[in-house]
Image (tube, rainbow, N blue to C red):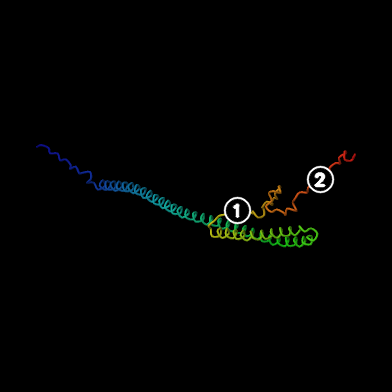
Amino acid sequence: MSAHVTRPKLMPVLADPAIRSAARLAVRVTAVLRSNAMFGKDDLVDNLARDLDRARGRRDALASEATTLTAQIAEIEARLSEEKKRRERDRILSELEAMKTRIRQAAGAFAPVVDGLCKAIEPAAAVVPEARELNTFLLSVASEVDSVLDPLLRELDQRADAVRAGHAALDLPISVINEAPPVELPKDSNDRLLRFPAWLSRDKEPEKKQPAENPRSTAA
């Protein structure tokens, strides 16, 4: 009788509940690890995207602020330029008004001086008849000055109106009234615009020397 050896059945490895449990745990751990790795990459992408959005937002805000500041700077520069022009116009108008005031004051003081001088010279005509000619000359000077002052003042008014309307810009130095140089009288009498009467300016003729007596005539 031949011996029959009965071999035990080999069970699959996964058939063991413990092994199956360990296998399931390993799969679960692997999935979790893969999920964490994937989520980590997604978090980095999200973070970078958020950083990019924030940077773009700051850039747009700065660009908008730069545009606003540029417009404000242009407005301030325009206002500053206009204010400088306004102050320059006011200064020039003030200088022109001061010129007219000084001219009127000087003219007002000039007329009484001429009148007083004429009255002082008039009695001298009884002794020096030519004094009447000097009086006539002084009156003609006063009349000439009076006739040219009115057009001068009108011209200054017209220049002031042009400056006030912005149609003209006068290059008038600051404090030209106070720093005006004194008027120099002409050194040569021939350059004078107003000439005194001839009898006042004629040169005195040198006295003629008496001719020496002829000795012959004396001897005769």
**Which of 101/155 is in front?**
155
| Mark 1 secondary-structure assignment | loop
Q: Position of residue 70 (x, y in %)?
A: 47, 53
**Which of 198/46 is in front?**
198
Question: The C terminus appears in which quarter of the rendering?
Answer: top right
Residue that protrudes farthest toward the front in the picture? 220
Q: Earlier in the sequence, mark 1 or mark 2?
A: 1
Looking at the image, is mark 1 or mark 2 nearer the viewer? 2
The residue indicated by pointer 2 is 208
| Mark 2 secondary-structure assignment | loop
Where 105 falls versus 13 (above or below)? below
- How many marks can you see? 2
Left or right of 146 in this view: 17: left
Residue 172 — which label?
1
Where 218 falls versus 103 (above or below)? above
Name which residue type carries label 1: Leu
Q: Position of residue 59 (x, y in %)?
A: 42, 51
- Say few, some or many: other residues with alpha carbon within 10 Å of mark 2 (under 14 / 14 to 19 / 20 or more): few
Q: Position of residue 17 (x, y in %)?
A: 24, 48
Residue that protrudes farthest toward the top in the picture? 2
Residue 8 — which label?
none
Name which residue type carries label 2: Lys
Q: Position of residue 180 (x, y in %)?
A: 66, 52
Q: Residue at x 81, y 45 (%)?
A: 208
